[in-house]
Amino acid sequence: MKIETHRLNNVNIAEVVSNGTIINTTEDGIDLLGNLYYQGFDRVLLDEKNITPDFFDLKNGIAGEILQKFSTYRVRLAIVGEFSKYTSKSLTDFIYESNKGRHISFVNSTAEALKILSA
């Protein structure tokens, strides 16, 4: 895993880059948040492929716990991926509601994530 820093509109954005899964458990997500927060980042871009598929099954609570921590610490997060493959109505509604707010965004491209996070 490596962190690429993007600086747009005088805002530092951490893009987490990895070929493998970074977040397998709630603890992994909280550790990542703590690591980035300690480094001074309050905006994070993460690819869907770096997150366990279990995250997208809302019944197990992984997504809720991790995203609540990001919101509590006021760290904005954009997750880049293709979310239309998930057929769960509750997940679709969750993504829709998240995208209406400012803290957590589910987007289709890195460019879109950077635009949202730098605003």
Image (cartoon, rainbow, N blue to C red):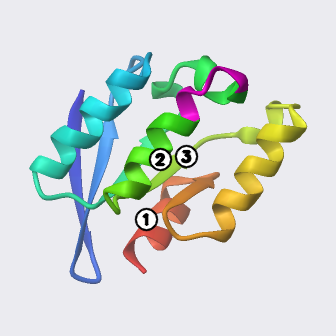
Q: Residues within 10 Å of mark 3 (few under 14, many from 20)?
A: many
| Bounds of the magenta segment | 59-63
The first of marks 3 and 2 along the sequence is 2
The amino acid sitting under disc 3 is Val
Q: Is residue 73 left or right of residue 109?
A: left
Residue at 76% x, 57% y: name it: 96
Give the position of the C terminus as an image quadrant.
Answer: bottom left
Q: Is residue 30 above or below residue 4?
A: above
Comparing labels 3 and 2, the label whose residue is closer to the camera: 2
The quarter holding residue 19 reads top left
Q: Is residue 24 left or right of residue 105?
A: left
Tag 3 residue: 80
Tag 1 residue: 114
Helix, strand, or loop for circle 2? helix
Q: Position of residue 74 (x, y in %)?
A: 35, 63
Q: Position of residue 35 (x, y in %)?
A: 17, 39
The amino acid sitting under disc 1 is Leu
Helix, strand, or loop for circle 1? helix
Q: Main secondary structure of the magenta part?
A: helix
The quarter holding residue 54 reads top right
The quarter holding residue 8 reads bottom left
Q: Is residue 116 above or below residue 41?
A: below
Q: Position of residue 29 (x, y in %)?
A: 37, 31
Tag 2 residue: 68
